[in-house]
Amino acid sequence: MTIKKAVIPAAGFGTRFLPASKAVPKELLPIVDKPTIQYIAEEAIDTGITQVILVTGREKGSIEDHFDISFELEHHLRSKGKDDLLKLVQGISEMVQIVSVRQKMPLGLGHAILCAKQIVGNHPFAVLLADDIVDADPPCLRQMIDVYNELGKGIVLAIKEVPRDEVYQYGIIDGEAVGDRLFRVASLVEKPPVEKAPSNLAVIGRYLLPPEIFEVLEELPPGKGGEIQLTDAIARLGESFPIYGYKFEGERYDAGDKMGFFVANVRFGLKHPELGPRISDFLLEVAEELKRSS
Ligand code: G1P
């Protein structure tokens, strides 16, 4: 059965992004001219996902508004004859069916996923983390679902090699290569110190999971940082389901980190159909200035 539902957790405080994220959800901070979460929703839609489940929290209502119809704005644009902008704004609200559910307490990523249990129901589903933007064609999630469909079952995680001094920021797998870009995962551990990391293959925020993950999450004690960790639940489910890591093709940006966010802005800016050439000229100018002054 192919995967049609995707959960996007967006309930976190965004502390890595303060002060920008104090009153604005970090998921709405724009990369060039589009909120980060829209890149994620578009990846899901381009993959063929038909229902997106947002897990939000307090002060995150504007994320739902972003994907909703904005009657006043549409009326305003129509009356001013701004048809291109009207189409753009309408397109966002027509993208996909979006359902949202609240995580009432910040108990961790695993707990956020558990909040989507009723809406996901008894089907395998995808999880996309809003911090991880992947620029890829075909989309990263599409690549993973193709692998999943070939395997026929199991858990598929997006993975990527990271520098060893960064392993403490990720879920890290212990795995053995079993095919082109494909690893069979023997175990995984959330944010290990470098000396305890089984490899430098990190889980990036894309997961394909069976509904049995919910039963595991319901019973799971808090893990790293006192939070209910998705990584721990997957490791436990690995006793009854095969886990695979897939080294996706594409460029990943950590949009939840100030530097990663800046890099993503430069890269997507350069690719932007209208702004790209001007941004490129501007960056060359800045590079010249820097060279002269160094
Ligand atoms: C989460 C997961 C971690 C994963 C990472 C990818 O951590 O818990 O296993 O490697 O996303 O971005 P976070 O970055 O939300 O702390």
Image (spheres, rainbow, N blue to C red):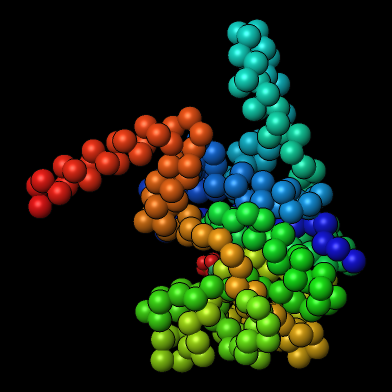
Q: Nearer the viewer, residue 35 or 133?
A: 133
Q: Is any part of residue 22 visible from this angle? A: no
Q: Is residue 12 left or right of residue 276?
A: right
Q: Ligand 1 lies in which image quarter?
A: bottom right
Q: Tell me if residue 146 comes above or below residue 49 in the rendering.
A: below
Residue 115 percent location from the top left of the image = 74, 62
Q: In the image, what residue occupies the spot 68% across and 34% down?
A: 92
Residue 130 percent location from the top left of the image = 58, 55
Q: Toward which corner of the image does residue 87 lie, by quadrant?
A: top right
Residue 116 percent location from the top left of the image = 76, 60
Q: How many labels does the image show?
A: 0
Q: In the image, what residue occupies the spot 77% across and 47% down?
A: 99
Q: Is any part of residue 63 visible from this angle? A: yes
Question: Quarter of the image containing the N terminus?
Answer: bottom right
Q: In the image, what residue occupies the spot 43% across and 36% down?
A: 276
Q: Nearer the viewer, residue 218 or 89?
A: 89
